[in-house]
Image (tube, helix red, strand yellow):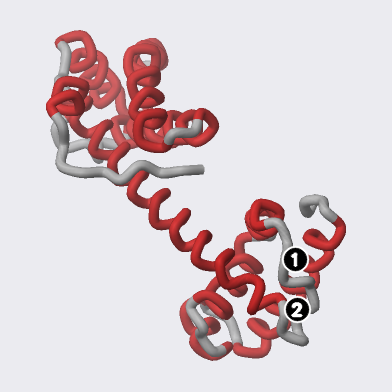
Amino acid sequence: MRVAKLGPMSNAVRAESAETEAEVRLALRIAGAGAARDVEAEAALYRHLAPRVRRYGLRHLRDASAADDLMQQVMLLVLDQLRTGRVREPERVVSFIFGSCRTLVLAMHRKESRRESLLERHGEMLATPEIAIAPRRDHERVARCLDALRERERSVLLMSFYDEKAADEVAGELGLTAGNVRVIRHRGIAQLRRCVEGGRELTA
């Protein structure tokens, strides 16, 4: 996935962020309903804005699947925050939505850069005795296998091999013991090796 760099907000984005009367009315209805929920207003706001969020994603992420993910994440986030009163100015809902888009795209950009850096180094990492995988593996396969790991195993591996943190540092950040970190790291390495060598993604 190639992520486009984001510069200052363009006139096109400003225009796209402009609130319309209909969208403001819908946002105010959702915020006013609170926990009781105005399902009709939520569905209408989704229909109004989801396609625009997807277009934003396509323009900045250059990937249809990533744009779909962005659309779902942003719209669910905004609807939830409107319901719970965490959007301080519901009348500026469109600006809030595209601000959320920008924040999430930047986060995705950082995640992608982090993963690419890890993959650039994976040959050296996987050549160590602890991770006996041939260094010249397809990067996309390794990326898929990393993504398929459970969150805890993936976090431990990234922090251990990308951030080069010792077991006690990882343990402190994740609320584990150093012994647990070593066990999780060993298990994660074994799962990653099986996945990469087998050419198939993990199922657990």
Along the line of sight, which residue is nearer the eye, 128 or 103?
128
Measuring from the top left, give residue 22's x and y in whole percent.
Answer: 21, 9
Q: N-terminal of the two: label 2 or label 1?
A: 2
Q: Residue furthest front?
A: 136
Q: Is residue 82 above or below residue 122?
A: above
Q: Which mark is residue 200?
A: none
Kindly identify the amino acid type of the residue bearing the numbered disc 2: Ile
Along the line of sight, which residue is nearer the eye, 3 or 148?
3
Q: Is residue 145 left or right of residue 30?
A: right
Identify the image quadrant of residue 119: bottom right
Measuring 41% from the left and 44% from the top, which residue is drawn there?
3
Q: Is residue 20 above or below residue 112?
A: above
Measuring from the top left, give residue 96's x and y in whole percent.
Answer: 22, 34
Q: Element type at marker 1?
A: helix
Q: Is residue 63 left or right of residue 51?
A: right
Callouts 2 and 1 close, C-beta under 8 Å: yes
Measuring from the top left, give residue 45's x and y in whole percent.
Answer: 33, 16
The residue indicated by pointer 1 is: 192
Q: Is residue 52 left or right of residue 145?
A: left
Measuring from the top left, give residue 184's x and y in whole percent.
Answer: 70, 76
The residue indicated by pointer 2 is: 131
Q: Is residue 150 above or below residue 92?
A: below
Which quadrant does the C terminus fall into? bottom right
**How much space separates mark 2 and mark 1, taking CA atoms?**
9 Å
Measuring 56% from the left and 67% from the top, which residue is drawn there?
120
Q: Is residue 44 left or right of residue 64?
A: left
